[in-house]
C-alpha cells in the first residue's frame, strides 16, 4: 500500500500560540510542528512570551513573536486579542493553532474577528469541576477541529464538553528518535550528568529517575514515601533522583526536603533541579518513574524513557496507559498509592539487569512503532491541510479575507 503524498503548505502561514517556551511537552510539540510546517513549504510563527526553548524554535525554522499571552485578566485578554488580530492581518496568517487555555481565548476572539480558521490541541487533563472552570477550559474544545494527544484525552474532552467526535482527531505526541535513542547518547554526555548529579556509578546503586517539574501532581512525594517503605537493604541498592524545575514552588520543594529528612533518606534521594539533557539523564538511569497523582493527558516521560529502552513505572490512569503495557514494558501502580509504587519498585530492583533490559527493549519496540515525531508531524499537517481546504470551500473568493467581520472571505490577501 503506497503512502499518500506529504502535505503541501506552500504559501500558507500558520500561527501557533502558547504561553511560553519552557521545557514542557506542549512546548516541544510546538517546536516540532514549526519544523514540519517549514519542511512542508509553509511559514511557521509562534506567539509566546518565549523561554529557554527559543533557540530550538529558531533552529527548527520558526519565528517567535513575543506576546504575553498567558495573562488571564479580562483587560489583558481583550488587549492581546486586538494585538493578535493585527498580527494576523499584517502577516497574512492563514490558520491559528492554540495550545493552551488563556492564549486559546485570545486566539479564538482574534481568529473569529479576522475570519481565519481556529483549531486547538487539547494537551492537558484540565482540572476543575465548577461550571465556571469547565467553561474556561472549554475554549480548548471550540476549534473548528480539535486535536487530542491521546485516546484518553479524546474520550475525556468529548465527555466533558459534549462536542461532536467527528471534529476530534487523536494524534499522540511523538518522540524524536534522533534524540531519544541509546546510541545517540555518548559517554561524555552521560559522564556530565553523573558528575552534575554526584552519582557514584561504581557503587552499584540503581539510579531511579523521576523527571518532571516539581509540582504535587507529578508524584514526587509519593515516590519519596515509596522509597521510605522499602527495607534498608533495598534502599541501599538505589538512588532516587528528582529532576525538574520548581518554577517558583518553594513551598513544595521545602515539603520534599522535609520528607527526605524525616525518613532519613539523604543518601537515597536527591533533588537536582532542571535538566538540559534529559536523554542523557535517561541513559544513566536504570528505572524511570512517572507516578503522576492526576491523569497525564499523554505521558511524554513514559514514551521518551521507553524509547531509551528503560523500564518505566507509571500511575495506572490517563494517557500513560496507552504507552506502558503492564508487566511487559513496565509496571503500573495505583495513582497516589505509595505502597503500590514501593511494591513495583521492589520488583524491578529485585530483577536481574538482563530482565530489566528485556523489559526496556520491549518498551522501545512498542514506542518506535507508535509514537514517533514523524507520525505526529504528518498527521497534524494533514489536519491543517483539511481545515484550510474546508475554509476555501466555504468562501472560494479569496480577495477580502481580513477585511470583513464574522463571515468574510478566506484565502490569500491580494
Image (spheres, rainbow, N blue to C red):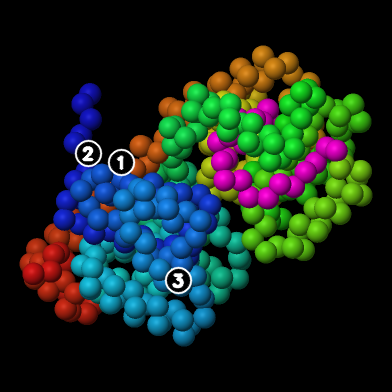
Give the image location of residue 169, x and y in percent.
37, 48
Asked whether the viewer can see residue 42, the reply is yes
The answer for how far apart the CA atoms under marks 2 and 1 are is 7 Å
Residue 111 drawn in magenta: no
Residue at image mark 1:
378
Q: Which of marks 3 and 2 is nearer the N terminus?
A: 2
| Residue 111, horizontal then vertical, whole percent | 30, 71
Q: Is residue 140 visible?
A: no
Q: Image point 67% across, 14% down: which residue?
A: 354
Q: How far apart are marks 3 and 2 (CA)?
A: 32 Å
- Range of residues picked out in magenta: 267-287
Give the residue displayed 45% in from the left and 43% down from the top. Answer: 173
Q: Residue furthest bottom?
A: 75
Describe residue 254's horizontal placement relative to residue 312 as left or right: right
Which residue is at 34% across, 43% downward?
A: 377
- Give the position of the N terminus as an image quadrant: top left
Q: Name the residue under label 3.
A: 69
Amino acid at each position: 500500500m503506497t503512502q499518500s503524498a506529504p502535505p503541501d503548505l506552500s504559501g500558507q502561514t500558520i500561527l501557533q500560540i502558547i504561553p511560553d517556551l519552557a521545557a514542557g511537552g506542549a512546548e516541544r510539540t510546538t517546536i516540532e510542528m514549526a519544523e514540519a510546517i517549514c519542511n512542508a513549504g509553509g511559514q511557521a510563527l509562534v506567539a509566546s512570551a518565549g523561554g529557554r526553548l527559543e533557540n530550538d524554535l529558531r533552529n527548527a525554522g520558526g519565528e517567535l513573536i513575543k506576546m504575553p499571552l498567558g495573562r488571564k485578566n479580562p483587560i489583558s485578554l481583550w488587549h492581546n486579542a486586538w494585538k493578535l488580530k493585527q498580527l494576523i492581518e499584517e502577516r497574512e496568517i492563514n490558520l491559528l493553532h492554540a495550545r493552551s487555555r488563556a492564549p486559546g481565548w485570545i486566539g479564538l476572539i482574534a481568529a473569529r474577528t479576522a475570519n481565519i480558521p481556529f483549531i486547538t490541541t487539547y494537551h492537558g487533563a484540565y482540572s476543575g469541576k465548577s461550571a465556571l472552570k469547565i467553561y474556561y477550559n472549554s475554549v480548548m474544545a471550540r476549534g473548528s477541529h480539535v486535536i487530542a494527544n491521546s485516546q484518553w484525552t479524546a474520550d475525556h474532552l468529548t465527555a466533558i464538553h459534549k462536542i461532536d467526535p467527528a471534529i476530534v482527531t487523536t494524534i499522540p505526541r511523538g518522540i524524536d528518535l534522533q534524540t531519544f535513542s541509546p546510541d545517540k547518547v555518548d559517554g561524555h554526555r552521560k559522564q556530565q550528568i553523573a558528575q552534575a548529579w554526584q552519582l557514584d556509578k561504581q557503587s552499584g546503586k540503581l539510579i531511579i529517575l523521576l523527571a518532571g517539574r516539581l509540582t504535587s501532581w507529578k508524584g514526587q512525594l509519593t515516590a519519596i514515601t515509596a522509597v521510605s517503605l522499602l527495607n534498608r537493604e533495598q534502599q541501599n541498592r538505589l538512588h532516587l533522583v528528582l529532576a525538574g524545575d520548581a518554577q517558583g514552588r518553594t513551598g513544595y520543594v521545602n515539603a520534599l526536603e522535609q520528607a527526605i529528612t524525616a525518613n532519613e533518606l539523604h543518601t537515597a534521594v536527591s533533588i537536582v533541579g532542571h535538566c538540559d539533557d534529559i536523554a542523557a539523564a535517561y541513559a544513566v538511569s536504570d528505572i524511570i518513574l512517572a507516578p503522576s497523582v492526576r491523569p497525564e493527558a499523554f505521558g511524554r516521560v513514559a514514551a521518551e524513557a521507553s524509547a531509551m529502552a528503560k523500564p518505566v513505572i507509571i500511575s495506572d490512569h490517563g494517557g500513560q496507559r496507552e504507552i506502558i503495557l503492564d508487566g511487559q514494558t513496565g509496571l503500573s501502580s495505583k495513582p497516589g498509592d505509595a505502597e503500590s509504587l514501593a511494591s513495583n519498585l521492589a520488583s524491578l530492583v529485585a530483577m536481574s539487569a538482563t530482565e530489566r533490559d528485556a523489559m526496556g527493549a520491549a518498551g522501545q519496540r512498542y514506542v518506535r512503532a507508535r509514537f514517533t515525531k514523524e507520525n505526529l508531524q504528518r498527521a497534524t499537517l494533514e489536519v491543517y491541510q483539511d481545515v484550510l481546504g474546508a475554509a476555501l470551500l466555504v468562501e472560494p473568493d479569496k480577495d477580502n479575507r481580513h477585511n470583513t467581520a464574522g463571515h468574510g472571505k478566506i484565502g490569500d490577501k491580494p
